[in-house]
Image: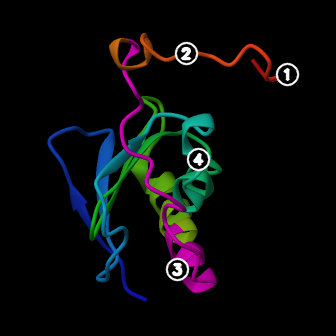
Amino acid sequence: MFIQTEATDNANVMKFLPGQEVYADGPVSFESLDAAAQAPLARRLFGVTDVQAVDIGTDSVTVKKSDGADWLHLKPAVLGAIMDHFVTGDAAVLEDVGVSPKADDVEGLELDESDPIV
């Protein structure tokens, strides 16, 4: 598998193009490992030291690194994580992660107080 890379206007952000579909319902962004609970590809990338954010698009993966990190050292690890993901055949995102509901959208919801989880 050959993954092309593309620099962006932001020196801390690099775009990775694997040459195949990544996530048909993209783009979707993840700012932390916790936010990536339903995204195996993003979780794998957050396992790379100095990865701060991951955007998964229809045919690309964009990674933001921390300020002190150097792409010279980080890029091979990110490429390896992306390649490993595609080799496993896992989905990039397990389900539609969409946008979290806004507070206004959940205000009118009624809770069933008999439910032990409530």
Q: Which residue is mark 1?
A: 116
What is the quadrant of the C terminus in the image? Answer: top right
Callout 3 amino acid: Phe
Q: Nearer the viewer, mark 1 or mark 3?
A: 1
Q: Earlier in the sequence, mark 1 or mark 4?
A: 4
Name the outermost residue toward the bottom. 1
The residues bearing labels 3 and 4 have C-alpha atoms spaced at a distance of 16 Å
Residue for badge 4: 46
- Helix, strand or loop at label 2? It is loop
Q: Which numbered marker is on residue 86?
A: 3
CA gap between label 3 and label 2 equals 42 Å
Mark 1 or mark 2, which is nearer the start of the sequence?
2
Q: In the figure, residue 9 lies in which quadrant?
A: top left
* Tag in front: 4 or 2: 2
Q: Categorize mark 1 by other alpha carbons within 10 Å: few (<14), some (14-19), many (20+).
A: few
Is the residue marked by circle 3 packed among few (<14), some (14-19), or many (20+) residues within 10 Å? some
The span shown in magenta is 82-103
Most frequent secondary structure within the magenta stretch: loop
